[in-house]
Image (cartoon, rainbow, N blue to C red):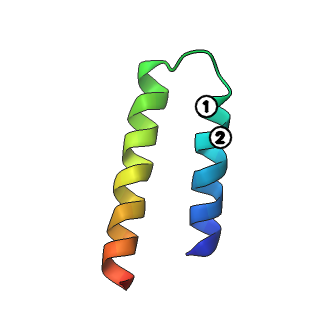
């Protein structure tokens, strides 16, 4: 669980360092957000 969140945060940091996001990156980021909130809701 913590490993997935760490990788997720790393992915966000990489996106923040880029000038712009293409639709594929936005789509992937949305999925990661949804999965993360699902896990947080499930285990809390």
Residue drawn 38% across the image and 47% down it: 31
Residue beneath label 1, please?
16
Q: CA distance from mark 1 to mark 2?
A: 5 Å
- Tell me, for residue 28, which label it has, or none: none
Image-based side of 4 in relation to 10, left or right:
left
Percent position of residue 39, x then y: 39, 72
Occupied quadrant, residue 5: bottom right
Q: Is residue 7 above or below residue 30?
A: below
The reply to whether the C-beta atoms of the residues labelled 1 and 2 are less than 8 Å apart is yes
Percent position of residue 36, x then y: 42, 62
Q: Quadrant of the N terminus?
A: bottom right
Residue beneath label 2, please?
13
Residue drawn 33% across the image and 67% down it: 38
- The crowding category of the residue bearing disc 2, from other C-alpha atoms within 10 Å (few below 14, some 14 to 19, many at least 20), is few
Percent position of residue 41, x then y: 31, 75
Q: Quadrant of the C terminus?
A: bottom left
Is label 2 in a helix, a strand or a loop? Answer: helix
Image-based side of 14 in relation to 25, left or right:
right
Q: Is residue 13 above or below residue 4?
A: above
Q: Is residue 13 above or below residue 23?
A: below
* Residue at the bottom extreme of this rendering: 44
Q: Is residue 3 above or below residue 8?
A: below
- The crowding category of the residue bearing disc 1, from other C-alpha atoms within 10 Å (few below 14, some 14 to 19, many at least 20), is few
């Amino acid at each position: 669980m913590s490993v997935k969140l760490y990788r997720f945060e790393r992915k966000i940091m990489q996106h923040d360092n880029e000038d712009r996001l293409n639709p594929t990156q936005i789509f992937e980021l949305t999925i990661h957000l949804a999965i993360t909130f699902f896990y947080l809701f499930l285990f809390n």
